[in-house]
Image (cartoon, helix red, strand yellow):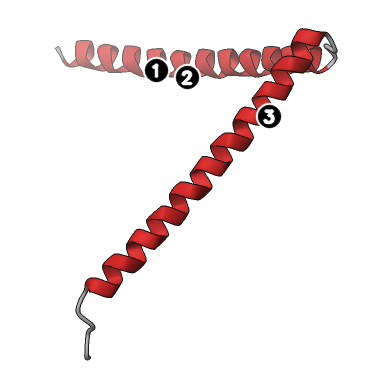
Amino acid sequence: MEQQIKDALNFFIGAASTVKDEAAKILSKVEEDFKKLSEKGSQDSSEIAQNVRKYSDEAVKEVDKLVSEIKTKIDEARTKVESLLPKDKA
């Protein structure tokens, strides 16, 4: 019985090690493929590619603007809440 437990434990250790190694290989391959596709895309100067870049840039700018406005509103709300709280006289 003790040997079976050791064998099972070794099996799981081996399986975990194999999964870890294979996951690292897959991640490396995905990163390599991503870089290749990115390079290929950067060389595309078609009208569609240019429009995608243009609209993506505009979308990012709008999101940044929205985030900035939200931060401003949160800061304003925080200031108002703090002004309503009693002052600590410590």
Q: Earlier in the sequence, mark 1 or mark 3?
A: 1
* Residue highlighted by disc 3: 57
* Pointer 2 local density, CA inside 10 Å: few below 14, some 14–19, many at least 20: few
Residue drawn at point x = 63 percent, y = 36 percent: 61
Q: Check disc 2 and report the residue beneath it.
A: 20
Determine whether, in the image, residue 82 is placed left or right of residue 32: left
Mark 1 surroundings: few (<14), some (14-19) or many (≥20) residues within 10 A: few
- Frontmost residue, 27 versus 34: 34
Q: Nearer the viewer, residue 37 or 46?
A: 46
Amino acid, disc 1: Ala
As measured in the structure, the alpha-carbon distance from the residue carrying label 1 to the one carrying label 3 is 43 Å
Residue 73 location (% of width, % of height): 41, 54
Residue for badge 1: 16
Find residue 83 and report its image quarter.
Answer: bottom left
Tell me if residue 76 comes above or below residue 69 in the rendering: below
Circle 3 or circle 2, nearest the eye: 3
- Most distant residue in the bottom direction: 90
- Whole-percent x, y for residue 84 in the image: 23, 72
Q: Residue at x 66, y 30 (%)?
A: 58
The Cα–Cα distance between marks 2 and 1, rounded to whole angstroms, is 6 Å
